[in-house]
């Protein structure tokens, strides 16, 4: 995740306490650079294919509000039963998007979330 942060085209990450994720908003013209920076989150789920996802990913999508048009759930390869995910959300104004990065699976403990915040230099 440190590599993602280092190559992220927008400034600043914050903590989204509602979803327990780090979050960054960025201008639409940075979309291709942001997607390239998030290359570790290679698997892409959308409203069109989320029903084919494993149950834990479908549950995650539902817990975070479902996937609407243009939204994506990006996932890393699993490490054991755990994984990193990204919520790619266009704001609907055609000008801004946000990326939220979180941890899923049984290893998503408070210690692991603190390490995620540390990797992105985010304070709660």
Image (tube, rainbow, N blue to C red):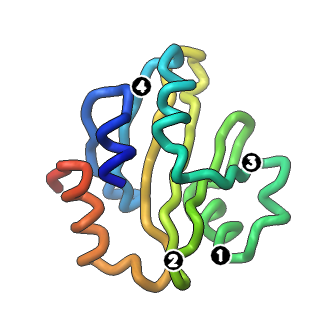
Total number of numbered labels?
A: 4
Q: Earlier in the sequence, mark 2 or mark 1?
A: 1
Say if mark 4 contacts mark 3, CB within 8 Å: no
Q: CA distance from mark 4 to mark 3?
A: 20 Å
- Using the numbered discs, state the Cα–Cα distance from disc 1 to disc 3 in whole angstroms: 15 Å
Q: Residue at x 24, y 55 (%)?
A: 119
Distance between mark 3 and mark 2 Cα atoms: 22 Å
Q: What is the spatial separation of the Cα atoms under label 4 and label 2, in whole angstroms?
A: 29 Å
Which residue is disc 4 drawn over?
26
In the displayed structure, 117 sits above or below 89; it is below
Q: Residue at x 41, y 82 (%)?
A: 107
Residue situated in front as seen by the camera: 53 or 80: 80
Q: Are marks 3 and 2 in contact (CB under 8 Å)?
A: no
Which residue in the structure is indicated by mark 2?
Answer: 79
Residue drawn where x is 36% and y is 61% of the image: 20
Of the residues tagged 3 and 2, which is closer to the observer? 2
Viewer-side label of 4, 2: 2
Which residue bears the numbered disc 1?
56
Q: Position of residue 10 (x, y in %)?
A: 34, 27
Q: Do the numbered discs 4 and 2 sit on residues whose CB atoms are within 8 Å?
A: no
Q: Earlier in the sequence, mark 4 or mark 2?
A: 4
| Residue plotted at (48% across, 63% down) | 84
The earlier-in-sequence mark between 1 and 4 is 4
């Amino acid at each position: 995740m440190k590599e993602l942060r280092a190559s992220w085209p927008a400034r600043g990450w914050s903590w989204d306490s509602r979803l327990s994720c780090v979050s960054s908003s960025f201008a639409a013209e940075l979309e291709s650079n942001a997607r390239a920076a998030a290359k570790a989150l290679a698997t892409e789920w959308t409203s069109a294919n989320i029903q084919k996802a494993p149950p834990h990913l479908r549950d995650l999508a539902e817990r975070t509000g479902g996937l609407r048009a243009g939204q994506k759930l990006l996932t890393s390869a699993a490490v054991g039963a755990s994984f990193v995910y990204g919520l790619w959300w266009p704001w609907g104004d055609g000008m801004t998007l946000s990326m939220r990065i979180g941890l899923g699976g049984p290893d998503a403990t408070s210690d692991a979330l603190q390490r995620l915040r540390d990797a992105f230099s985010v304070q709660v």
